[in-house]
Amino acid sequence: MLTDALTDETHPYPVALVCAPAGSGKTRAVADWARELLAADDAPTIAWLTIEERHNDLDVVHRAILRALTDSGNPRLQKACAGLVSESPDLGATLSAALHELGENIWMIIDDAHLLRDTDVLTDLESFMRWQPPMLRTVIVGRFEPPLALQRLRLDGRLFTLTATDLAFTSDESAEMLDEHGVVLSPDDLDALMVRTEGWAAGIRLAGMSLEGHPDPSRLIAEFSGDRRAVADYLIEEVLAGQTDEMREFLLRTSVPVSFTVELAEKLTGCTDAHGNIDWLEHHNFLISRITENPTHYRYHPLLRSYLRAEISRIGHVEVEHLELTAAHWHDEFGDALLALEHAVNSGDHDEIVALLARTSLPLIIGGHGEAVDRILTRAPRASQDHPSARLLRAAAALASGNIPVATSTLELLDRRKSGLLVDGATESRVHLLLRESLRVQTAIGTGDIETALKRLQSVGGGSSGDPDLDAFVLLQEGRALLFLGRDDDAEAVLGRSLAHARLGDAPLSVMYCLGTLAAVSMSRGAVTVVSELVDEALTIGRTQSATSDPTFQLTKLIDSWCRYMRMDPDAARVAAESAEALRRASTGTAGLADGATALFGLDESEHRHGSVTMVHADSPVSSALPMPPGIRAVLLPAIQYAYLSAGEIGWAHELATEAQAFLGPTGDTPLVEAIIHLHLHRLDLARRTIQPVLDGELECAAGTNLIAAWLVDASIALARKHDSRAHSALTEALRLAEPQSVLRPFHDCGPQIRDLLVRSTGRFGVLEPFAERLRASFPRSESTASDMLTPRELELLVELPSWRTAEQIAADLCVSVNTVKTHLRGIYRKLGVTSRRDAIAAAQHNGLL
């Protein structure tokens, strides 16, 4: 970056400023750049001056500059400087004139420039840089920007600045430095080290020294912090040295929170000029930075903060507890319940922990912080861990991780305490009761006793507390229970109320959860358009709220992949695979379902179809023992059934039909999958009798898309019987049902006979013709040798056929006789094996010629 900036002739920078804290590798970076520059054919002369305290004297620094130029190894430059007098008050002007007359490219590097503070020296350097000759480039290197008036250079576009962020080591550069110590880390260990050091060169170097020959690199990296002897010594000598006692105290106290504002710093330190201290630290490139997402918040480098946290005990245990409580109250006041709880636990104050849990149970559960709270509470006093609010949060954590047995036992313990064993004789609040019963519903969805849990929740009056956040959460759980019970209409109504409360309470994540669950309801009905709209909004909220790792976000993304699949979007399998990987990292137990969906959605592109179908069977979203809304099972049935039959797995197909009957009961979806088997086995009469009640409306499909599949089965039966008129009518009905949802997949599942019928019926679908054409285009073009048989003139004429213009009109456009056109038409019909213009168009489309 430095080389590119300083050697860019289209926008030259006469001056470069490289400022970064101790140990950032700035001097090494400039030295490496200088060596690289000197290796070039047109290398400039490089003079290097390292500033020391004694250079805060005009005569001394003048002599040092002349000596650096003289010692650069350029005899012509040495001669040009020989006649200059360091004591001259106008040395800058005479030096500039001499360098200008020399006319050679020269680079002056002034290292450790942060040590310059003498006013005369700084003024002299400012003046020189402002009027330095064009062939001279000046590079100023220091821990922080010296008090030079550089604003004019910046405004004029003549100053290039590199900061600590620019100089942070990348993973590759870190690996190269570690290799100097004979250390080679796995990708995961290297990533962990980058998180610990944030690319700070000194931290990586110290880690390399510690890792050299270490038998367990992963453990060392996990424990690599500021209180390790080598790191602590470096921080003391290079970072903290020279700080006043007041500043050290400020650093210790503000290291309590992970990040802090000026106001929080004042509360922690009692310092009325906290803003001035922070400004000083920033200006001097201390290991402090603003948080990009929230620039009013500051944070220390992780290694420095861990050192300060280890040192803080010297101000006394009682004072540390007070600081932790101060931070807890601050975060609680500003609505960050998780950080407030962490600081309260760090303080060890049982009363404060319990009071905070009572106030924040709802936002912590709704915000999906159960697992984080569980980790924090393991450090809390035992009495705090046993409090009902803590138990409630631990049940939520168990549910978040998919640990249903732990959630069940925790809720059972709360039931026993409700009967008179509550800690400290406390009485269960209505909020606590609603949360407990809502979590019980979540647990029941995993165990199967949904009806009982739902009745308990409804008996306590969910959705009427007056707190929009609480009501949104409780109604969401009720709606989910109804969805899993197959009561889609009731689920939609309850979830609509939940969504209204969530929007009223300004709870974006609750809105995302409601939208995702409503999308699942619509998927159960096969309403692809509605599903697509709901998931788009839900996923947008999730990305905006940085909640992409949330399991609900990923399950919503999985529903989105189904929409794509039904519309033949080639990204369907990729989106499903991304969800599966994210769910696997979250360890929720639903990754297997996502794997099955990925295999199903990717069958068209699979090179080993039978192996992929085997994966579908192993992780079938339909056959899985995991809880699944019956409507979602139903909507996937036809595609899975066709996949089994295409792989020759008749046994799996019969097994699927039996399972469908068990979990769906008397709906039209079960006879559909049975009819698909009969059709495959060419038992046409039985297939027709099986599917007829669905077509007549006597049996309603749980999923609307399955009615499309039913009419396509009827069309396939008619084709097999050579009943072209009935086949066309059935296909038209399927198109009528599919067109509003832009559903294409069921037509592809039925096989090539449906595509052939679509091609043969070109122009016969009336207002549905545009959709039919889109459907035809979605099929892959078949390979054909017909184009080899047709002459160039015949191919030219073939393109004119769909226009339905007369032979005379075509002849006029092609400047040939009508007889010639008719002769070519006869040749086309003969080669395509047809007898009419309409059939010729259909055959050409079938063979990919149109």
Image: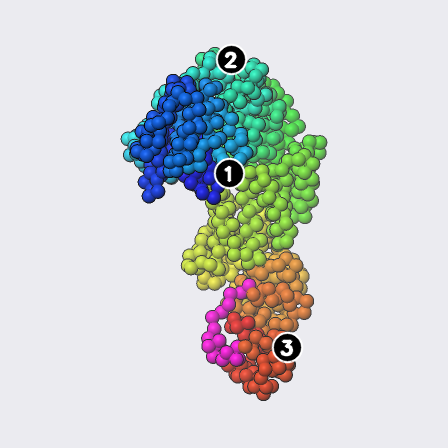
Query: What's the residue at 53%, 58% (across, down)?
Result: 639
Q: Earlier in the sequence, mark 1 or mark 2?
A: 2
Q: CA distance from mark 1 to mark 3?
A: 63 Å
Image coordinates for residue 162, horizontal then vertical, percent: 46, 33
Q: Is 791 inside the magenta-drawn segment?
A: yes
Q: Secondary structure at mark 3?
A: loop
Q: Which residue is mark 2?
A: 319
Indicate the amino acid at tag 3.
Answer: Trp
Q: Are marks 1 and 2 in contact (CB under 8 Å)?
A: no
Crowd band around label 1 with a 10 angstrom C-alpha radius: few (<14), some (14–19), many (20+)? some
Q: Which residue is mark 3?
A: 804
Q: Going by the image, does 676 lie left or right of 82?
A: right
**Quadrant assignment, res 679:** bottom right
**Quadrant assignment, res 25:** top left
Is residue 59 at all visible to an observer of this figure? yes
Q: Is residue 205 above or below residue 556?
A: above
Q: Which residues are magenta?
A: 778-795
Q: Earlier in the sequence, mark 1 or mark 3?
A: 1
Indicate the amino acid at tag 1.
Answer: Gly
Query: What's the residue at 62%, 59% (across, down)?
Result: 742
Q: Secondary structure at mark 1?
A: loop
Image coordinates for residue 568, horizontal then vertical, percent: 55, 58
**Quadrant assignment, res 353:** top right
Query: What's the residue at 64%, 35% (across, down)?
Result: 507
Is residue 167 at all visible to an observer of this figure? no
Q: CA distance from mark 1 to mark 2?
A: 40 Å
Quarter holding the N terminus is top left
Image coordinates for residue 27, horizontal then vertical, percent: 38, 30
Query: What's the residue at 52%, 53% (across, down)?
Result: 572
